[in-house]
Amino acid sequence: MTDRESVTFLIVDDDEVAVMAIKRALKKLRLVNPIEVVGDGQEALDLLRGVNSAALERPYIILLDLNMPRMGGLEFLAEVREDKELANSVIFVLTTSDAPSDIAVAYEHKIA
């Protein structure tokens, strides 16, 4: 690693094929940043808050799916934006949902 900070990508998605596609796209762009993968919003919150392990260190970018078991993306967004330690997290939503309500709610939670 150079003297610049490395940004970690946190992929929050339960679909292994989607995760592989994201990793492939990052590799094609020649991005060699660290990548962490979790399967739902609760696992992501646990990682960000350091539950059961060290917390994911900043800087990081979260790539978030909306439709997941246990805790979906919209619930995760609400939790993150209400947490003063996590509220400024940079989050990109990647989803197959075309529901206008999902898109509107995501934007209300300041997604990138």
Image (cartoon, rainbow, N blue to C red):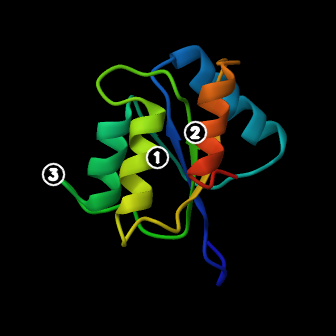
State the residue position of label 2. Answer: 105
Instruction: Decide which of tag 2 and tag 1 comes sooner along the chain.
Output: 1
Residue type at mark 1: give it.
Leu
Can the viewer see residue 72 in this picture? yes
| x and y, in percent, of residue 1 in the image | 61, 71
Please state which of the two labelled residues, at mark 3 or mark 1, is closer to the viewer: 1
- Nearest the viewer among 3 and 112 is 112
Crowding near the residue tagged with mark 2, few <14, some 14–19, many ≥20 C-alpha atoms within 10 Å = some
* Residue for badge 3: 52
The amino acid type of the residue labelled 3 equals: Asn
Q: Is residue 79 above or below residue 76?
A: below
SS for dot 2: helix
Q: Residues within 10 Å of mark 1 (few under 14, many from 20)?
A: many
Q: Which mark is residue 49?
A: none
Residue found 69% across the figure and 25% down from its top: 100
Are the two marked residues, 3 and 1, in contact with CB atoms closer than 8 angstroms?
A: no
* x then y, percent, for residue 25: 77, 34
What is the CA distance from the residue labelled 3 to the residue labelled 1?
21 Å
Can residue 94 be seen at all in this image of the molecule? no
- Residue 95 quadrant: top right
